[in-house]
């Protein structure tokens, strides 16, 4: 009520709320407690949606996913010290993924922290947050709240998006100021993510390289999905006729069934391509740093074109022949303007060779996917989910695990942009339920969370959150009794099970039933198909415990080579 027009003063609580609302922020993901419990109540009373979690890491992951999906910074609100620390993993992961989010944490007063006098949940949070995020600010005076929120929003969205920390000491909320002055102190951020237009000569250099290529390839990264330049990206691919590869969260920018998709011939095109254009994709570990066997090191040098908003990203791993610096929307538009009707499509021997390998690999995959072994394996269970997503391309897929992640990435086709959320650049487990909640809250679309059983365990308690808000989320737990698989044994002879093995034949579906959701134990593909179709149609919170052959997995899935012991054997 203090922020109502007729009031003569306004307090810190309402200045924070009004600043967020002024900047079109309508949702807060958080977990109440001293000193922000009242802020959550007041925010809800003032019309903000407040989604309260069971662990701050998942609130933070939800904020990050909301940022990726909306281009508005997701807001995560936590208590001080331990709550702040729980949010830090999500803040650091958002920064690594370039997802815009703001972690707002209550904190102890500076005079106590700086003298280390042992306050309740005392911690120098600003200092600790700084190395882990894009920017970090603290506000001490009510009249600075408007600036603090504005700076955090601009830092999260401008340039390369990322995580920002905003430190609000407890006493700030109770401070008051004259209401009109308070309203004047708030800032509506103008153009928080300004377009950055590429230099014409850089665009020409890139187009000339593409024109001269015998085996061109376009690589689309999650930055291309975040850019929401969908029509231009699709037009650039289709007008040039160049084959493309989507990284996992870029899937759906063009339908995975598109004739120019080279995903089913990934190894071949990475080895053979002579000019590669990176659009919102970084040459990090996910792309073998742009060198070595993956890139056909003995097949002659490749030339890279790289579109990125950060000039310092260029040459990070290998030389970039044609950097195009700017925001992806502006860069793609400029390139597209240079593709005229006379543009020569890539040589038929290149596109033909890709098509041949694609057809062979897809035919082999079709046979595998048609099989119905008992118990289910990753492929048969994923072929059911593949069919459901094909029937409901508007559904959002969340995915984490090792085998569950790697196989789903190639088996479950996506048809629309920003419909797949997964472990991203870090390969972090635990994003599942936070990302699923955000996807449901932000889009109102059905969400299918494809979860390894270990991965699900990181955020499983949020099943209660999902039921509490009655969210349209269907969790499919690929239960193979362990991390990667369930067959490891403890060679020591002591009674403990092996470190990678779980309770055998656990019933995760009972967890969902505990909170009023729908639980289903699926032992066959048909049972999985029926339960999944019903969940997507009913939009009821559902958990399907998909019983998977416990011998089916491989250690660390596709990245087993990163295990030191594996590397040693080489
Ligand atoms: C925060 C964090 N802690 C540990 C790990 C290491 C890891 C990578 S994948 C994975 C789980 C694999 O088991 P799951 O049963 O989910 O998958 P599946 O093979 O499909 O059966 C772990 C623990 C990571 N990446 N992040």
Image (tube, helix red, strand yellow):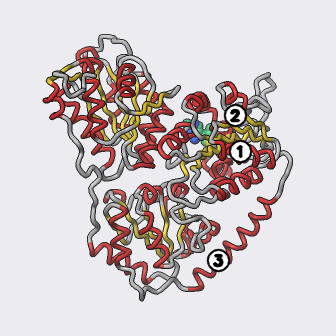
| Residue 200 in the image, given as x and y percentages of width and height | 27, 74
- For residue 27, the mark is none
In the shown orientation, is residue 308 left or right of residue 566?
A: left
**Spatial separation of the CA atoms under disc 3 and disc 1:** 37 Å
| Residue 19 in the image, given as x and y percentages of width and height | 26, 35
- Asked whether mark 1 and ligand 1 are closer than 8 Å, the reply comes as no
Within 10 Å of the Cα at label 2, are there few (<14), some (14-19), or many (20+) other Cα atoms? many
Q: Which residue is mark 1?
A: 534
Q: Quadrant of the N terminus?
A: top left
- For residue 518, the mark is 2
**Spatial separation of the CA atoms under disc 3 and disc 2:** 43 Å
Ligand 1 found in image quarter: top right
Residues marked 1 and 2 touching at CB (< 8 Å): yes
Q: Quadrant of the C terminus?
A: bottom right
The answer to which of marks 3 and 1 sits earlier in the sequence is 3
The mark closer to the camera, 3 or 1, is 1
| Residue 352 in the image, given as x and y percentages of width and height | 62, 82
The mark closer to the camera, 3 or 2, is 2
Query: Which residue occupies 70% across, 34% down?
Result: 518
- For residue 355, the mark is 3
Residue 17 seen in the current view: yes
Residue 490 seen in the current view: no
């Amino acid at each position: 009520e203090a922020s109502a027009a007729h009031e003569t003063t306004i307090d810190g609580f309402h200045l924070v709320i009004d600043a967020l609302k002024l900047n079109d922020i309508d949702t807060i993901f958080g977990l109440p407690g001293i000193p922000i419990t009242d802020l959550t109540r007041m925010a809800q009373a003032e019309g903000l949606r407040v989604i309260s979690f069971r662990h701050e890491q998942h609130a933070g992951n939800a904020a990050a996913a909301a940022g990726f999906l909306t281009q508005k910074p997701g807001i995560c609100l936590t208590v001080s010290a331990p709550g702040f620390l729980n949010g830090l993993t999500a803040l650091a992961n958002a920064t690594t993924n370039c997802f815009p989010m703001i972690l707002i944490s209550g904190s102890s007063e500076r005079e106590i922290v700086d003298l280390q006098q042992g306050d309740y949940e005392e911690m120098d949070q600003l200092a600790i947050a700084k190395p882990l995020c894009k920017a970090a600010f603290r506000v001490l005076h009510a009249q600075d709240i408007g600036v603090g929120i504005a700076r955090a929003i601009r830092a999260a969205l401008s340039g390369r998006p990322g995580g920002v920390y905003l430190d609000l000491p407890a006493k700030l909320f109770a401070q008051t100021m004259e209401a009109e002055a308070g309203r004047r102190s708030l800032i509506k951020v103008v153009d928080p993510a300004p377009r950055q237009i590429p230099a014409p000569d850089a665009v020409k250099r890139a187009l000339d390289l593409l024109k001269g290529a015998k085996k061109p390839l376009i690589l689309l990264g999650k930055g291309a999905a975040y850019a929401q330049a969908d029509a231009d990206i699709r037009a650039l691919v289709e007008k040039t006729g160049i084959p493309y590869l989507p990284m996992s969260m870029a899937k759906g920018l063009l339908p995975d069934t598109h004739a120019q998709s080279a995903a089913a011939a990934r190894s071949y095109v990475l080895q053979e391509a002579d000019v590669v254009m990176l659009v919102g994709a970084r040459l990090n570990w996910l792309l073998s740093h742009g060198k070595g066997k993956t890139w056909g090191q003995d097949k002659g040098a490749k030339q890279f074109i790289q579109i990125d908003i950060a000039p310092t990203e260029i040459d990070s791993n290998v030389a970039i022949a044609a950097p195009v610096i700017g925001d992806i929307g502006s860069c793609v538009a400029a390139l597209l303007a240079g593709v005229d009707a006379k543009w020569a499509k890539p040589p038929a021997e290149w596109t033909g060779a890709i098509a041949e390998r694609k057809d062979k690999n897809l035919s082999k995959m079709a046979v595998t996917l048609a099989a119905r072994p008992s118990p289910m394996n990753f492929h048969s269970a994923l072929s059911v989910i593949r069919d459901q997503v094909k029937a409901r391309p508007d559904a959002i897929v969340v995915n984490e695990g090792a085998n569950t992640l790697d196989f789903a990435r190639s088996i479950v086709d996506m048809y629309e942009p920003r419909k797949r959320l997964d472990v991203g650049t870090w390969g972090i487990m635990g994003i599942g339920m936070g990302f699923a909640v955000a996807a449901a809250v932000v889009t109102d679309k059905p969400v299918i969370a494809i979860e390894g059983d270990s991965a699900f365990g990181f955020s499983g308690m949020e099943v209660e959150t999902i039921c509490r808000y009655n969210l349209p989320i269907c969790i499919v737990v690929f239960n193979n009794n362990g991390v990667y698989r369930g067959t490891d044994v403890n060679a020591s002879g002591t009674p403990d099970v092996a470190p990678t093995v779980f309770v055998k034949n656990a019933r995760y579906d009972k967890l969902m039933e505990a909170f009023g959701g729908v639980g289903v134990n699926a032992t066959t593909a048909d049972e999985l198909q029926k339960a999944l179709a019903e969940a997507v149609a009913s939009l009821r919170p559902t958990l399907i415990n998909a019983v998977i052959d416990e011998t089916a997995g491989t250690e660390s899935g596709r990245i087993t080579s990163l295990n030191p012991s594996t590397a040693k054997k080489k």
